[in-house]
Image: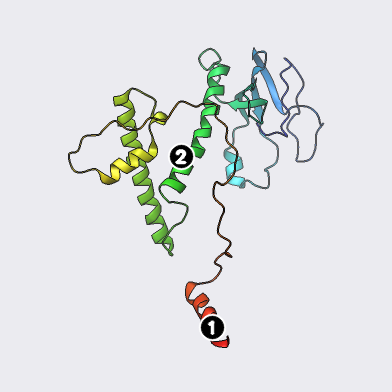
Amino acid sequence: MHQKQIVNFTPGRLQVEPARRGKGPKGQPRSGWLQQLGEHDQRVQWLKPLTCPPWMEAEQFAHVPDRLEVRELRYRVHRKGFRVKSITLVTALLDAAFYTVEALAQLYWARWGIETNFAHLKTTLGLDVLKCKTVDGVLKELIVFALIYNLVRLVMAQAARRQQVAIDRISFVDAARWLAAAHDEESLPWLVMNPHRPYRYEPRVRKRRPKQYPVMQNTRQALRKVLANKTDTD
C-alpha cells in the first residue's frame, strides 16, 4: 500500500465517498469496510472515482469497474537490519483461511529475490552493457540474454530436483559455467549449493575503488583526434 494511502482497520468505520478530484473530507480512508477477517486483516471495496485521473486514458478509465473488492492486511517486521517495521499489503486473495497473513507476508518477502535475479542478468551474464547500436540489434541481444537466462534456470531446476533442495539454493554462477563448458550428452553433475541465509543483510558499498578517469561522452574516433591535436601542439 502506498504510504500516503489511509488504512483504518476499525470495523464499520466511515469512508470517503467518490468525489471529483481534490474534493471530499480528509483523514478518512477511501476504501469501504465490508468484513473483519482478523485484528489487522479486513475485506474492503475500492470505489471508482467520478473523474478520470490525468495519468490514465479515458478509454482505460471507462473499462475500470465501479467497485473492486480487495483485502487489506498489516503485519509487523521483527528482523534485525530491516528498515521497515510495519508493512500493509493489498491483495485480491480474499480467502483468509487458505491465504493466511503469514503466508502472504512470506510471499511478499520473497519478492526481494527479484533483485538477485536482476544481478544475475546484469552482472553475471553481462546485460548491463549492450553491444549493439541499432534498435533491432538491441532487441535481438535482449532475446539472446533471455534465452540464455531461461536455459540456466532450467539447469538449476533440474539440479534442484536431483539434489532435493529449493531452486534458489543452486548457484546460478556454477550452473552458467557448467552450461558454457558442457559437451554433448554430458550428464549434469552436482552443482554448488548456496547456504541458507534468508535474513542476511549487507551494506551497499563497492568493494573496489573505480579508476579516476572521466566518463566517455564522445566517440573514440573523436577522442583520438583530440589527443593527436594535443600531441602536435605540445
Name which residue lies at 52% across and 75% down: 223
Residue pointed to by mark 1? 231
Location of residue 222 in the rendering, given as x and y in whole percent from the top left corner: 51, 77
Q: Residue furthest front?
A: 234
Mark 1: which amino acid? Thr
Name which residue lies at 71% across and 32% down: 5
The image quadrant where one finds the C terminus is: bottom right
Mark 2–mark 1 distance (CA, rounded to whole Å): 47 Å
Residue 22, picture quadrant: top right
Name which residue lies at 57% across and 53% down: 209
Residue pointed to by mark 2? 117
Location of residue 9 in the rendering, given as x and y in whole percent from the top left corner: 71, 18
* Local crowd size for mark 1, using a 10 Å CA cut-off: few (<14), some (14–19), many (≥20): few
Decide which of 55, 75 is in the foreground and name it: 75
Residue 18 in the figure: left or right of residue 133: right
Above or below residue 37? Residue 198 is below
Residue 151, picture quadrant: top left
Residue 202, picture quadrant: top right
Location of residue 219 in the rendering, given as x and y in whole percent from the top left corner: 50, 72
- Secondary structure of the residue carrying tag 1 is helix
- Secondary structure of the residue carrying tag 2 is helix
Mark 2: which amino acid? Asn
